[in-house]
Amino acid sequence: MFVPKAKREYGYYVLPLLVGDDLAGRAEPFFDARTRTLRLLGEWGDTSRLGESLEELAAWLGATTVSIER
């Protein structure tokens, strides 16, 4: 977050994806409140169960759309 964009290994604000106590991967979600869209800007590691987490996060935020950008 505090590293210049060119030097970042991951994204601006990255959340950990945990399986139990183990770090399985990382995800960079962004919520656009104006359009009520949850966008996934990046993903790293084992993201096989990321869809479940995005659905929960979207519901919690009140997002009406989920967009995955690749």
Image: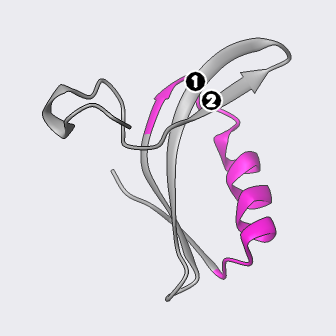
Residue nearest the observer in this picture, 70 or 56: 56
Residue nearest the observer in this picture, 31 or 69: 31
Residue type at mark 2: give it: Pro
Residue nearest the observer in this picture, 54 or 31: 31
Up the image or down, 4 lies above or below 25; here it is below
> The N terminus lies in which quarter of the figure?
top left
Going from N to C along the chain, the mark reached first, 2 or 1, is 2
Residue located at (58% from left, 83% from top): 36
Residue located at (74% from left, 47% from top): 53
Q: Which residue is mark 1?
A: 25
Up the image or down, 12 lies above or below 56; here it is above
Rendering quarter of residue 25: top right
Q: Secondary structure at mark 1?
A: strand
Q: Is residue 16 left or right of residue 28?
A: right
Which percent across, then down, holds residue 61? Answer: 72, 70
Which percent across, then down, holds residue 41? Answer: 40, 52
Residue type at mark 1: give it: Gly
Which percent across, then down, holds residue 47? Answer: 59, 31
Up the image or down, 12 lies above or below 41; here it is above
